[in-house]
Image (cartoon, rainbow, N blue to C red):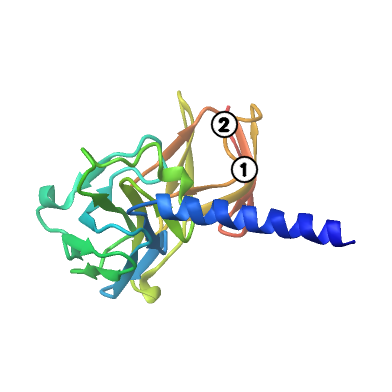
Amino acid sequence: MMRKITKATHFILATGAMLLSNLVQADGQLMVMPARSTVEGQQTRTVQVSNLGDKPLYLKIDLMRLENPGEDPERKTSLGEIAQPEMMVNPAKLTLGPGQKRDINLVALKVPARETLYRLYVVPVSSIKVVGEESKDKISAPLTFGVAYGVLVHHLPPTGAQTHGWTHQCSANGLQLTATGTVHSLFTALQAVPAGSVPAELKVFPDTPRVFPVTQLKGSADGQPFDVRCP
C-alpha cells in the first residue's frame, strides 16, 4: 500500500511540475472574454482582456464590420472606411502588465435598422497583420491566444424593433434563402437534396442572401417547420 501511495504522489508532483513549467514558459499570454458579444440599440458593452503571462503586452484594437456574415471567407470593412459608422471601440491601444486586466468598450453610436456584425480584433504589437480567417471558427469562451483574434459582435435593433422573417427563391445556382426581418433567421435540423449540401444548422442575416446547390430543403426556420422545393 505504501508503494502505491508513493507512486501516486510522485505522479501528482511530476504532473504539477510540468503544468507549472508550461505556465512559466507561456510569456505574454492574452485572454479575452466573452468571445461573442451582443449590443442592442445604443447600449455599451465591454470585452475584458487579461495578461496571463509574466511580460507586458502592447495591444492594438480594431473593429471591423462584416459585409457577408455567415459566409466564408469573410469580407470586412475597417471603421475608418465607413462614412457614418454605427459603432466604435475605445480605447484603440492598450498596455497590459503581467496579471493586469482592462476593459474594451463597444460603444453604439446609432440604433441600427437591422442586425449588423463586427469582429473586434485584439492585436499584439508584434503581429504583422490582422489574422482572423483561419481562427474564426475556433472561438470559445474564455479564449487565450498569442496572436490577433476576432471576437464576434452582434449589433441589434432594440428588442421592440426586432423581427424575424425569411423567403426562398429558385435560381440557376440552386435555392436562395433571404432573411426579410431585422435580425437573422435560424435554420435547424436541415435536410437537403442532394444530401450533405448544407450544414445541419445555419443562420441567414439581413442583406446577405445565401444560395445553396440543392433542389429541396426542409427543417425548422425560427422554430417553425418548413419544406421547400425547386424544379
Side of 231 relative to 26 (left or right): right
Q: Residue 45 falls in which quadrant of the image?
A: bottom left
Circle 1 packing at 10 Å, graded few (<14), some (14-19), many (20+), is few
Per the rendering, the mark at residue 230 is 2
Q: Position of residue 135 (x, y in %)?
A: 41, 42
Snapshot quadrant of residue 110: bottom left
Q: Is residue 193 left or right of residue 122?
A: right
Judged left or right of residue 19, residue 72 is: left
Q: Earlier in the sequence, mark 1 or mark 2?
A: 1
Query: Disc 1 to disc 2, how far (Cα)?
Result: 19 Å
Residue type at mark 2: give it.
Cys
Query: In front: mark 1 or mark 2?
Result: 1
Labels 1 and 2 touching (C-beta < 8 A)? no
Pointer 1: what residue? Answer: 200
Three-letter code for the amino acid on which mark 1 is drawn: Ala
Q: Position of residue 47 (x, y in %)?
A: 33, 67
